[in-house]
Amino acid sequence: MKKALIITLCAALLAMSCPVMAYTSNSPSVYVNGSLVKLDAEPDTYYYYNMWTLPLSGMWKALNFSLNTYTEDETFVIAYGNMNILLRMGSRYAYVFDGGTVSMKTLSIAPYLKGTETMVPDEVFALGPNDVVTHNTNTYAIDIRSQGLSVRQDQNSAAANNKIPILGVTAKYIPEKENYPILAFDGDLSTRYASTDFDAVFDLGSVRQVDAVDLAFWFNEVRLEKYRLSVNEDGVNYVEIFNGESTLGNTWETVDVHQNARYIRVEGFGNSDNLWTSLLEIVVRGW
């Protein structure tokens, strides 16, 4: 892209800039095409626009896209797939160059500085025709699905290896000998631990930084599970993370934790059909 074109477009962007109103809340987890992305700076939550913003340099380190910045006019170009996306600090308008076509997109939030970090709305990373960004307010997660983006190899390795091994489990009640607790973390979705008085504590062996817990319930695609998830470091003082119902239609439930913990406790209170809780798999993620 030629600098003259960038300068011309920047003038138009300058005329259409707008202020940002914001409120920072807890930091969500970020997933790109199903992989958890480890960022070196935290995202922001902006309730005024019901949007999340992401650290640009952190995303550049984690994902395969090119980034060119022009400090003199506060513009930058993100390129992924067949697209070049021109943005400017303080402006909600982005120009998307896709092959021989140019289009203008209105962003929910203008890019801004947070300290020395440039923050951009998460939709910037899903501007392709079939791309999508979804927000899960229950699990506090950003899910980016983009055909033009991929996770860098070192991040792929981290994402693949960020499962924390479960070393043991203690269950209050085992009504079925064929569906015993250890089957809940055997890596096999065809097995399960089932109980009408479901209370299982999974031991990580030592205190770890737990980012999220993934749960797969039996028949969760067609019925709701009622459960509570708590964590602690000493086996005594539990912190409740989630208490409610599963999301109907999903095989996996993701509960964001962001706590140091050794023990993960799952209590089940039946489902929308009966009093049984059947856990196919539990996966603990973190570092």
Image (spheres, rainbow, N blue to C red):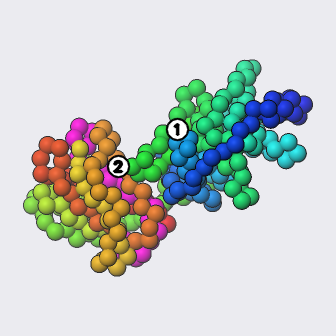
Number of numbered discs on residues: 2
Q: Amino acid at mark 1?
A: Val
Instruction: Give the camera-side residue of 134 and 161.
Output: 134
Rendered residue at 36%/61% (across/down): 241
Tell me whether circle 2 and circle 1 mark residues in contact (CB < 8 Å).
no
Q: Residue 249, percent across and down?
A: 30, 38
Q: Is residue 156 left or right of residue 1?
A: left
Q: Position of residue 225 (x, y in %)?
A: 23, 48
Whether residue 167 appears in this view of the structure is no
Q: Which residue is mark 2?
A: 253
- Quadrant including the N terminus: top right
Give above or below for 38 relative to 2: below
| Local SS, label 2 | strand
Q: In this figure, which residue is indicated by the disc labeled 1?
A: 133
The overriding secondary structure of the stretch rendered in magenta is strand
**Front residue of 92 and 55:** 92
The percent position of residue 205, horizontal first and vertical second, equals: 37, 75
Segment tinted magenta in the rendering: 204-223
Q: Is residue 63 magenta?
A: no
What x and y, as percent, mark residue 222? 23, 37
Q: Residues within 10 Å of mark 1 (few under 14, many from 20)?
A: some
Q: Nearer the viewer, residue 209 or 63?
A: 209
Amino acid residing under circle 2: Glu
Q: Residue at x 28, y 52 (%)?
A: 244
